Image: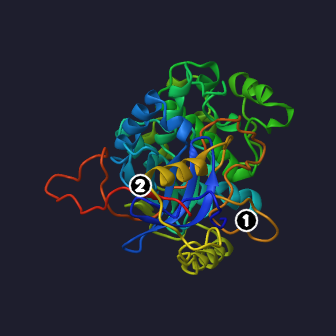
Amino acid sequence: MEKLGAGDPQRIGAYRLLARLGAGGMGNVYLARSDRGRTVAVKLVRRELAEREEFRARFRQEVRAARQVGGHWTAPVLDADTEAVVPWVATGYVAGPTLQTVVSHGHGALPERSVRVLAAGLAHALQDIHAAGLIHRDLKPSNVLVTIDGPRVIDFGIARALETIGGDGLTRTGALVGSPGFMAPEQVRGDRITPACDVFCLGSVLAYAATGALPFGAAGSGAHALMFRIVQEDPDLNGMPEELADLVRDCLRKDPAARPTLAQILQRTGAEDTVADGRSRDPWLPGTLVAQLGRQAVRLLDTEDPEEGAATGNPARPQTPAQAVEDAAGAGGGVSGAGGHGAGPGGGAPAFPVDLAKQPGTAAPAGAPEASPEHAPASDTPDGAAPPPPGQPAPDRKPTQVVGPG
Protein backbone atom coordinates (compact mmCIF):
# COMPACT_ATOMS: atom_id res chain seq x y z
CA MET A 1 0.00 0.00 0.00
CA GLU A 2 1.45 3.37 -1.04
CA LYS A 3 0.47 6.98 -0.42
CA LEU A 4 -1.29 8.78 -3.24
CA GLY A 5 1.10 10.50 -5.58
CA ALA A 6 1.02 13.67 -7.62
CA GLY A 7 -0.56 11.90 -10.58
CA ASP A 8 -3.32 10.17 -8.62
CA PRO A 9 -6.90 11.44 -8.46
CA GLN A 10 -8.45 12.19 -5.07
CA ARG A 11 -11.93 10.92 -5.89
CA ILE A 12 -13.39 8.47 -8.39
CA GLY A 13 -17.17 8.55 -8.58
CA ALA A 14 -18.56 8.57 -5.04
CA TYR A 15 -15.32 7.21 -3.56
CA ARG A 16 -12.58 9.15 -1.80
CA LEU A 17 -9.20 7.55 -2.45
CA LEU A 18 -7.03 6.62 0.54
CA ALA A 19 -3.98 4.95 -0.97
CA ARG A 20 -2.63 3.23 -4.05
CA LEU A 21 -2.89 -0.54 -3.91
CA GLY A 22 -1.07 -1.34 -7.11
CA ALA A 23 -0.95 -1.15 -10.88
CA GLY A 24 -1.07 -3.56 -13.76
CA GLY A 25 -1.96 -4.14 -17.38
CA MET A 26 -5.48 -2.75 -17.02
CA GLY A 27 -4.76 0.30 -14.86
CA ASN A 28 -4.29 1.50 -11.30
CA VAL A 29 -6.06 0.14 -8.24
CA TYR A 30 -6.82 2.26 -5.19
CA LEU A 31 -8.00 1.70 -1.65
CA ALA A 32 -11.02 3.95 -1.28
CA ARG A 33 -13.92 4.77 1.02
CA SER A 34 -17.47 5.61 0.05
CA ASP A 35 -19.35 8.60 1.42
CA ARG A 36 -21.13 6.14 3.71
CA GLY A 37 -17.84 4.92 5.15
CA ARG A 38 -17.46 1.58 3.34
CA THR A 39 -13.98 0.52 2.28
CA VAL A 40 -13.60 -0.65 -1.33
CA ALA A 41 -10.99 -1.19 -4.02
CA VAL A 42 -11.42 0.95 -7.15
CA LYS A 43 -9.76 0.04 -10.43
CA LEU A 44 -9.27 2.88 -12.92
CA VAL A 45 -8.81 1.67 -16.50
CA ARG A 46 -5.89 2.93 -18.53
CA ARG A 47 -6.87 5.68 -20.93
CA GLU A 48 -5.31 3.98 -23.95
CA LEU A 49 -7.54 0.96 -23.32
CA ALA A 50 -10.63 3.09 -22.72
CA GLU A 51 -10.17 4.65 -26.16
CA ARG A 52 -10.54 1.24 -27.84
CA GLU A 53 -14.20 0.55 -28.43
CA GLU A 54 -13.71 -3.20 -28.60
CA PHE A 55 -12.11 -3.15 -25.15
CA ARG A 56 -14.81 -0.91 -23.72
CA ALA A 57 -17.57 -3.16 -25.06
CA ARG A 58 -15.95 -6.26 -23.56
CA PHE A 59 -15.28 -4.45 -20.28
CA ARG A 60 -18.93 -3.40 -20.10
CA GLN A 61 -20.06 -6.97 -20.75
CA GLU A 62 -17.70 -8.51 -18.19
CA VAL A 63 -18.62 -6.02 -15.46
CA ARG A 64 -22.29 -6.76 -16.00
CA ALA A 65 -21.67 -10.51 -15.77
CA ALA A 66 -19.36 -10.22 -12.75
CA ARG A 67 -22.02 -8.31 -10.82
CA GLN A 68 -24.18 -11.43 -11.00
CA VAL A 69 -21.64 -13.60 -9.17
CA GLY A 70 -22.66 -14.22 -5.57
CA GLY A 71 -20.40 -12.75 -2.92
CA HIS A 72 -20.06 -15.82 -0.67
CA TRP A 73 -16.66 -16.98 -1.89
CA THR A 74 -15.67 -14.05 -4.10
CA ALA A 75 -15.01 -10.36 -3.71
CA PRO A 76 -18.13 -8.89 -5.34
CA VAL A 77 -18.33 -6.14 -7.94
CA LEU A 78 -20.23 -3.34 -6.19
CA ASP A 79 -20.18 -0.28 -8.39
CA ALA A 80 -18.88 0.80 -11.78
CA ASP A 81 -19.11 3.40 -14.49
CA THR A 82 -18.35 1.69 -17.77
CA GLU A 83 -19.48 4.73 -19.77
CA ALA A 84 -17.15 7.28 -18.18
CA VAL A 85 -14.38 8.81 -20.28
CA VAL A 86 -12.05 6.82 -18.02
CA PRO A 87 -14.05 3.72 -16.94
CA TRP A 88 -13.71 2.33 -13.43
CA VAL A 89 -15.04 -0.47 -11.28
CA ALA A 90 -15.32 -0.72 -7.47
CA THR A 91 -15.13 -4.09 -5.76
CA GLY A 92 -15.48 -5.34 -2.22
CA TYR A 93 -12.36 -5.03 -0.08
CA VAL A 94 -11.41 -8.30 1.59
CA ALA A 95 -9.30 -7.97 4.74
CA GLY A 96 -6.79 -10.71 4.08
CA PRO A 97 -3.44 -11.40 2.36
CA THR A 98 -3.08 -13.44 -0.79
CA LEU A 99 -2.41 -17.15 -0.65
CA GLN A 100 0.89 -16.39 -2.36
CA THR A 101 1.95 -14.16 0.52
CA VAL A 102 0.83 -16.66 3.15
CA VAL A 103 2.80 -19.51 1.60
CA SER A 104 5.88 -17.70 0.27
CA HIS A 105 6.41 -14.85 2.70
CA GLY A 106 4.59 -15.82 5.86
CA HIS A 107 3.38 -19.15 7.21
CA GLY A 108 4.66 -21.54 4.55
CA ALA A 109 2.83 -24.57 3.15
CA LEU A 110 -0.57 -25.20 4.73
CA PRO A 111 -1.55 -28.39 6.60
CA GLU A 112 -3.74 -30.99 4.90
CA ARG A 113 -7.00 -29.94 6.56
CA SER A 114 -6.49 -26.31 5.59
CA VAL A 115 -5.84 -27.34 1.98
CA ARG A 116 -9.04 -29.41 1.94
CA VAL A 117 -11.12 -26.46 3.15
CA LEU A 118 -9.28 -24.25 0.65
CA ALA A 119 -10.25 -26.68 -2.12
CA ALA A 120 -13.89 -26.68 -1.03
CA GLY A 121 -14.06 -22.87 -0.84
CA LEU A 122 -12.43 -22.41 -4.24
CA ALA A 123 -14.72 -25.01 -5.80
CA HIS A 124 -17.74 -23.13 -4.44
CA ALA A 125 -16.33 -19.86 -5.82
CA LEU A 126 -15.79 -21.37 -9.26
CA GLN A 127 -19.31 -22.78 -9.26
CA ASP A 128 -20.67 -19.27 -8.68
CA ILE A 129 -18.40 -17.81 -11.35
CA HIS A 130 -19.35 -20.45 -13.92
CA ALA A 131 -23.05 -20.06 -13.10
CA ALA A 132 -22.74 -16.40 -14.14
CA GLY A 133 -21.40 -17.46 -17.53
CA LEU A 134 -17.77 -16.62 -16.73
CA ILE A 135 -14.57 -18.64 -16.77
CA HIS A 136 -11.86 -17.28 -14.50
CA ARG A 137 -8.91 -18.46 -16.65
CA ASP A 138 -6.30 -16.99 -14.28
CA LEU A 139 -6.86 -18.68 -10.92
CA LYS A 140 -3.54 -18.51 -9.06
CA PRO A 141 -2.29 -17.90 -5.49
CA SER A 142 -2.18 -14.13 -5.96
CA ASN A 143 -5.86 -14.18 -6.96
CA VAL A 144 -6.92 -16.03 -3.80
CA LEU A 145 -7.30 -14.03 -0.58
CA VAL A 146 -7.05 -15.80 2.75
CA THR A 147 -9.46 -14.74 5.51
CA ILE A 148 -10.40 -16.21 8.87
CA ASP A 149 -13.75 -17.33 7.42
CA GLY A 150 -12.30 -18.97 4.31
CA PRO A 151 -10.73 -18.19 0.93
CA ARG A 152 -12.01 -15.51 -1.45
CA VAL A 153 -11.43 -15.46 -5.21
CA ILE A 154 -10.72 -12.18 -6.97
CA ASP A 155 -10.09 -10.93 -10.49
CA PHE A 156 -12.73 -13.05 -12.19
CA GLY A 157 -14.13 -12.06 -15.57
CA ILE A 158 -13.06 -8.44 -15.82
CA ALA A 159 -9.46 -9.03 -16.88
CA ARG A 160 -10.74 -10.99 -19.88
CA ALA A 161 -11.58 -7.69 -21.55
CA LEU A 162 -7.87 -7.36 -22.34
CA GLU A 163 -8.26 -10.18 -24.84
CA THR A 164 -9.95 -7.77 -27.23
CA ILE A 165 -6.69 -5.89 -27.74
CA GLY A 166 -5.24 -8.77 -29.75
CA GLY A 167 -6.57 -11.93 -31.29
CA ASP A 168 -6.71 -15.58 -30.39
CA GLY A 169 -6.38 -14.92 -26.66
CA LEU A 170 -3.42 -12.57 -27.00
CA THR A 171 -2.85 -9.28 -25.24
CA ARG A 172 -1.66 -6.20 -27.05
CA THR A 173 1.97 -7.27 -26.44
CA GLY A 174 1.43 -10.75 -27.85
CA ALA A 175 1.56 -12.46 -24.45
CA LEU A 176 -0.84 -15.26 -23.63
CA VAL A 177 -3.58 -14.35 -21.18
CA GLY A 178 -2.77 -16.17 -17.95
CA SER A 179 0.16 -16.81 -15.63
CA PRO A 180 2.68 -19.39 -16.91
CA GLY A 181 2.91 -21.48 -13.74
CA PHE A 182 -0.87 -21.79 -13.42
CA MET A 183 -2.09 -22.15 -16.99
CA ALA A 184 -3.97 -25.16 -18.31
CA PRO A 185 -2.58 -27.09 -21.32
CA GLU A 186 -5.44 -25.88 -23.52
CA GLN A 187 -4.50 -22.29 -22.70
CA VAL A 188 -0.90 -22.92 -23.68
CA ARG A 189 -1.97 -24.57 -26.95
CA GLY A 190 -4.50 -21.86 -27.75
CA ASP A 191 -7.38 -24.36 -27.80
CA ARG A 192 -10.98 -23.67 -26.87
CA ILE A 193 -11.37 -22.78 -23.19
CA THR A 194 -14.04 -24.43 -21.05
CA PRO A 195 -14.77 -24.40 -17.29
CA ALA A 196 -12.44 -27.41 -17.02
CA CYS A 197 -9.60 -24.92 -17.50
CA ASP A 198 -10.35 -23.53 -14.03
CA VAL A 199 -10.25 -27.07 -12.58
CA PHE A 200 -6.68 -27.48 -13.85
CA CYS A 201 -5.70 -24.13 -12.37
CA LEU A 202 -7.36 -25.15 -9.09
CA GLY A 203 -5.17 -28.27 -9.01
CA SER A 204 -2.04 -26.14 -9.44
CA VAL A 205 -3.14 -23.78 -6.66
CA LEU A 206 -3.81 -26.67 -4.26
CA ALA A 207 -0.41 -28.22 -5.02
CA TYR A 208 1.26 -24.90 -4.30
CA ALA A 209 -0.68 -24.43 -1.05
CA ALA A 210 0.22 -27.91 0.19
CA THR A 211 3.90 -27.96 -0.79
CA GLY A 212 5.01 -24.37 -1.39
CA ALA A 213 6.16 -25.37 -4.88
CA LEU A 214 4.64 -25.24 -8.36
CA PRO A 215 3.65 -28.67 -9.70
CA PHE A 216 5.45 -28.14 -13.01
CA GLY A 217 8.46 -26.33 -11.62
CA ALA A 218 9.55 -22.73 -11.54
CA ALA A 219 10.02 -20.51 -14.55
CA GLY A 220 13.74 -20.14 -13.93
CA SER A 221 14.49 -22.05 -17.10
CA GLY A 222 12.11 -19.82 -19.04
CA ALA A 223 8.38 -19.48 -19.50
CA HIS A 224 8.39 -21.57 -22.68
CA ALA A 225 10.09 -24.49 -20.93
CA LEU A 226 7.54 -24.25 -18.13
CA MET A 227 4.65 -24.27 -20.59
CA PHE A 228 6.15 -27.30 -22.33
CA ARG A 229 6.16 -29.17 -19.01
CA ILE A 230 2.52 -28.21 -18.40
CA VAL A 231 1.51 -29.67 -21.77
CA GLN A 232 3.75 -32.74 -21.87
CA GLU A 233 4.96 -33.80 -18.42
CA ASP A 234 3.43 -35.16 -15.22
CA PRO A 235 3.18 -32.86 -12.19
CA ASP A 236 5.62 -33.19 -9.30
CA LEU A 237 3.43 -33.79 -6.24
CA ASN A 238 6.12 -35.00 -3.86
CA GLY A 239 5.38 -34.14 -0.26
CA MET A 240 1.61 -34.14 -0.60
CA PRO A 241 -0.57 -36.52 1.44
CA GLU A 242 -1.49 -39.38 -0.92
CA GLU A 243 -5.27 -38.91 -0.84
CA LEU A 244 -4.92 -35.18 -1.48
CA ALA A 245 -2.33 -35.88 -4.18
CA ASP A 246 -4.82 -38.16 -5.96
CA LEU A 247 -7.37 -35.34 -6.12
CA VAL A 248 -4.82 -32.82 -7.37
CA ARG A 249 -3.43 -35.29 -9.91
CA ASP A 250 -6.92 -35.77 -11.35
CA CYS A 251 -7.44 -31.98 -11.57
CA LEU A 252 -4.16 -31.74 -13.50
CA ARG A 253 -5.04 -34.24 -16.20
CA LYS A 254 -4.08 -33.02 -19.67
CA ASP A 255 -7.46 -33.91 -21.18
CA PRO A 256 -10.10 -31.42 -19.96
CA ALA A 257 -12.83 -34.09 -20.23
CA ALA A 258 -10.94 -36.35 -17.80
CA ARG A 259 -10.83 -33.81 -14.98
CA PRO A 260 -13.35 -34.02 -12.13
CA THR A 261 -16.29 -31.67 -11.96
CA LEU A 262 -16.50 -29.07 -9.23
CA ALA A 263 -19.25 -31.08 -7.53
CA GLN A 264 -16.98 -34.13 -7.50
CA ILE A 265 -14.14 -32.06 -6.09
CA LEU A 266 -16.37 -30.83 -3.28
CA GLN A 267 -17.32 -34.39 -2.42
CA ARG A 268 -13.72 -35.60 -2.47
CA THR A 269 -12.41 -32.84 -0.22
CA GLY A 270 -14.38 -34.25 2.69
CA ALA A 271 -15.00 -30.64 3.71
CA GLU A 272 -18.42 -30.10 2.13
CA ASP A 273 -20.08 -30.26 5.56
CA THR A 274 -17.69 -27.75 7.10
CA VAL A 275 -18.16 -24.92 4.59
CA ALA A 276 -21.43 -23.11 3.96
CA ASP A 277 -22.71 -19.63 3.14
CA GLY A 278 -19.27 -18.35 2.28
CA ARG A 279 -17.47 -19.40 5.44
CA SER A 280 -15.86 -22.31 7.19
CA ARG A 281 -17.93 -23.36 10.20
CA ASP A 282 -14.83 -24.46 12.10
CA PRO A 283 -11.38 -22.84 12.32
CA TRP A 284 -9.56 -23.80 9.13
CA LEU A 285 -6.18 -22.10 9.55
CA PRO A 286 -3.28 -22.77 11.94
CA GLY A 287 -3.44 -20.65 15.10
CA THR A 288 -0.29 -18.68 14.29
CA LEU A 289 -1.75 -17.63 10.96
CA VAL A 290 -5.06 -16.63 12.53
CA ALA A 291 -3.18 -14.39 14.98
CA GLN A 292 -1.27 -12.79 12.12
CA LEU A 293 -4.48 -12.10 10.21
CA GLY A 294 -5.96 -10.44 13.28
CA ARG A 295 -2.96 -8.14 13.72
CA GLN A 296 -2.98 -7.17 10.08
CA ALA A 297 -6.71 -6.48 10.06
CA VAL A 298 -6.23 -3.90 12.80
CA ARG A 299 -3.94 -1.92 10.49
CA LEU A 300 -6.83 -1.23 8.16
CA LEU A 301 -8.70 0.50 10.99
CA ASP A 302 -5.83 2.98 11.30
CA THR A 303 -6.07 4.06 7.66
CA GLU A 304 -7.39 7.61 7.69
CA ASP A 305 -8.91 9.68 4.93
CA PRO A 306 -6.16 11.87 3.48
CA GLU A 307 -6.70 15.58 3.84
CA GLU A 308 -7.57 17.58 0.76
CA GLY A 309 -4.42 18.09 -1.26
CA ALA A 310 -2.37 15.71 0.91
CA ALA A 311 -1.37 13.64 -2.10
CA THR A 312 0.74 16.48 -3.44
CA GLY A 313 1.37 18.53 -0.32
CA ASN A 314 -0.50 21.43 -1.88
CA PRO A 315 -4.01 22.70 -1.22
CA ALA A 316 -6.59 21.36 -3.63
CA ARG A 317 -7.67 23.69 -6.38
CA PRO A 318 -10.78 23.61 -8.56
CA GLN A 319 -10.47 21.74 -11.83
CA THR A 320 -12.36 21.68 -15.05
CA PRO A 321 -13.82 18.29 -16.03
CA ALA A 322 -11.23 18.01 -18.79
CA GLN A 323 -8.37 18.58 -16.33
CA ALA A 324 -9.80 16.03 -13.93
CA VAL A 325 -10.08 13.37 -16.62
CA GLU A 326 -6.59 14.13 -17.91
CA ASP A 327 -5.07 13.76 -14.43
CA ALA A 328 -6.96 10.54 -13.79
CA ALA A 329 -5.95 9.10 -17.14
CA GLY A 330 -2.33 9.92 -16.45
CA ALA A 331 -2.53 7.98 -13.22
CA GLY A 332 -3.31 4.79 -15.09
CA GLY A 333 -0.88 5.12 -17.98
CA GLY A 334 2.43 3.46 -18.65
CA VAL A 335 1.85 0.42 -16.45
CA SER A 336 2.57 -3.08 -17.66
CA GLY A 337 3.01 -6.56 -16.29
CA ALA A 338 1.14 -8.27 -13.49
CA GLY A 339 0.29 -6.05 -10.57
CA GLY A 340 -2.38 -5.41 -8.05
CA HIS A 341 -2.27 -4.97 -4.33
CA GLY A 342 0.65 -2.62 -3.81
CA ALA A 343 4.12 -2.64 -2.30
CA GLY A 344 5.89 -5.96 -2.27
CA PRO A 345 6.84 -7.78 0.90
CA GLY A 346 9.85 -6.40 2.63
CA GLY A 347 11.46 -7.32 5.92
CA GLY A 348 9.17 -8.83 8.50
CA ALA A 349 5.55 -9.76 8.04
CA PRO A 350 4.15 -8.04 4.95
CA ALA A 351 1.16 -5.79 5.42
CA PHE A 352 -1.73 -6.32 3.08
CA PRO A 353 -2.84 -5.42 0.51
CA VAL A 354 0.31 -6.99 -0.89
CA ASP A 355 2.17 -7.09 -4.17
CA LEU A 356 0.60 -9.46 -6.64
CA ALA A 357 3.31 -8.84 -9.20
CA LYS A 358 5.89 -10.99 -7.41
CA GLN A 359 4.94 -14.62 -7.79
CA PRO A 360 7.39 -17.30 -6.70
CA GLY A 361 8.66 -19.14 -9.72
CA THR A 362 6.38 -17.39 -12.18
CA ALA A 363 7.12 -14.45 -14.39
CA ALA A 364 3.88 -13.12 -15.76
CA PRO A 365 4.45 -11.79 -19.26
CA ALA A 366 4.39 -8.06 -19.76
CA GLY A 367 0.90 -6.89 -20.55
CA ALA A 368 -0.82 -9.90 -18.97
CA PRO A 369 -3.96 -9.07 -17.00
CA GLU A 370 -3.11 -7.97 -13.50
CA ALA A 371 -4.51 -9.65 -10.43
CA SER A 372 -6.90 -7.00 -9.29
CA PRO A 373 -7.67 -6.49 -5.61
CA GLU A 374 -11.40 -6.70 -5.02
CA HIS A 375 -12.43 -6.25 -1.48
CA ALA A 376 -15.61 -5.15 1.08
CA PRO A 377 -19.26 -3.94 0.76
CA ALA A 378 -20.48 -0.91 -1.11
CA SER A 379 -23.03 1.32 -2.44
CA ASP A 380 -24.41 2.75 -5.57
CA THR A 381 -25.50 1.40 -8.95
CA PRO A 382 -23.82 3.23 -11.85
CA ASP A 383 -24.82 4.06 -15.35
CA GLY A 384 -24.13 1.18 -17.68
CA ALA A 385 -24.12 -1.41 -14.88
CA ALA A 386 -26.64 -4.12 -14.13
CA PRO A 387 -29.88 -2.82 -12.56
CA PRO A 388 -30.74 -3.63 -8.93
CA PRO A 389 -32.59 -6.91 -8.21
CA PRO A 390 -36.34 -6.91 -8.91
CA GLY A 391 -38.37 -5.30 -6.17
CA GLN A 392 -35.50 -3.15 -4.92
CA PRO A 393 -35.35 0.56 -5.72
CA ALA A 394 -32.29 1.92 -7.41
CA PRO A 395 -30.06 3.68 -4.83
CA ASP A 396 -29.41 7.37 -5.05
CA ARG A 397 -26.08 8.14 -6.58
CA LYS A 398 -23.99 11.18 -7.28
CA PRO A 399 -22.78 12.17 -10.72
CA THR A 400 -19.60 10.37 -11.67
CA GLN A 401 -16.48 12.26 -10.68
CA VAL A 402 -12.82 11.71 -11.35
CA VAL A 403 -11.17 14.51 -9.46
CA GLY A 404 -7.46 15.06 -9.85
CA PRO A 405 -5.05 15.98 -7.09
CA GLY A 406 -4.67 19.59 -8.04
- Image vertical order of residue 134 relative to residue 28, above or below: above
Q: With 352 as the anchor, is 278 left or right in this view? A: left
Residue 109 in sight in this render = no
Give the quadrant of residue 64. top left
* Nearest the eye: 352 or 14: 14
* Left or right of residue 186: residue 122: left
172 up-or-down from 8: above or below: above
Indicate the position of residue 119 as horizontal and vertical percent values: 54, 50
| Residue located beneath label 2 in the image | 76
Q: What residue is drawn where x is 72% and y is 34%?
A: 235
Q: Give left or right: position of 113 versus 375.
A: right
The C terminus: image quadrant:
bottom right
- Which residue lies at the image location 57% right of the left edge and 72% below the top edge? 309
Q: Earlier in the sequence, mark 2 or mark 1?
A: 2
Assign a secondary structure to mark 2: loop
Looking at numbered disc 1 in the image, what kind of residue is underneath it?
A: His
Badge 2 crowding class, 10 Å Cα cut-off, few under 14, some 14 to 19, many 20 or more, is many
Give SS at disc 1.
loop
Which residue is depicted at the point 62% across and 68% down? 311
Q: Residue 162 in the image: state x and y as whole percent.
A: 53, 33
Quadrant position of residue 251:
top right
For the N terminus, the image quarter is bottom right
- The amino acid on which the numbered mark 2 sits, given as a three-letter code, is Pro
Mark 2 vs mark 1: in front = 2
Give the farthest residue toward the left: 391
Q: Is residue 35 above or below residue 24?
A: below
Location of mark 1 (residue) = 107
**38 or 334: nearer the eye?**
334
